[in-house]
Image (cartoon, helix red, strand yellow):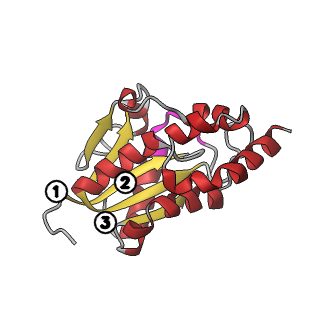
Amino acid sequence: MRKDYVFENGIVVGRFQHIHLGHEKLINIGLSVCKRMIIFIDGVDKTGVRNPFSYECRKELIEIIYKEEIEQGRIIVAPLENLEIITLPNPKWGKFVINSAKEIIGTTPDLIIYGKDKNIFKCFPKDIVKNISEIMVDRKQVEISATKIREYLKNNDIENWKKYTNSKIHFEYEKLRKILIHSLL
């Protein structure tokens, strides 16, 4: 394992409904500069059209893609179970994320990586992250969204779905499509 990482512990938070190449961009940037990454899967208990995939399903997809890094201890996949309903953007949520990371790794993370979003600073105000570095990745670098991924599944557009998803999960297409279609009924 490399010993020259810039950061010890980084975090990425997402709903991952479901993981796509945009999410992987964030994770891979983290892996390039951090010794260890926590991938928090948010919205563990949410269901519905925007959240058709269970926590276990989303975790399984991440584990398929990042199997080696997980086995090496470089990635920890964890649920981000909200203690209360918090409407985002909200600094209470950002504090909850940081405290959840502390519970897992025993210290404050060094780095947060997130997609550029005008509301992200309302979730992670400077007093919460004053000693944590941040990397903001422009979402236009990989122009895809989970909404678009779900649309490809819904419309049985396997070619576009494959274009924006990791080939390691392509064998899961029919299963994911079935879950999505069932959530729409």
Name the residue at the front extreme.
Answer: 159
Residue at 50% of width from left, 43% of height from top? Answer: 20
Asked whether 154 falls inside the magenta stretch, the response is no
Left or right of 95, for residue 177: right
Residue at 43% of width from left, 39% of height from top? Answer: 22
Crowd tier of the residue under label 2, counting other residues whose Cα lies within 10 Å: few below 14, some 14–19, many 20 or above = many
**How far is disc 3 from disc 2 in space, using C-alphas?**
12 Å
Left or right of 42, for residue 11: left
Residue 102 lies in what quarter of the image?
A: bottom left
Residue type beneath disc 1: Val
Q: Which mark is residue 6?
A: 1
Q: Which residues are magenta?
A: 86-94
Residue type beneath disc 3: Thr
- Give 58 or 10, whichever is nearer the viewer: 58
- Give 169 or 19, whichever is nearer the viewer: 169
- Give 180 or 121, whichever is nearer the viewer: 180
Q: Secondary structure at mark 1?
A: loop
Q: Is residue 76 visible?
A: yes
N-terminal-most mark, 3 or 1: 1
Q: Which mark is residue 107?
A: 3
Please give the residue where the numbered disc 2 appears in the rendered image. 11
Q: Position of residue 177 (x, y in %)?
A: 72, 45
N-terminal-most mark, 3 or 2: 2
Q: Marks 3 and 1: which is nearer the front? A: 1
Residue type beneath disc 2: Ile
Residue at 35% of width from left, 37% of height from top? Answer: 125
Q: Position of residue 121 (x, y in %)?
A: 37, 32
Asked whether 92 falls inside the magenta stretch, the response is yes
Q: Is residue 163 above or below residue 11?
A: above
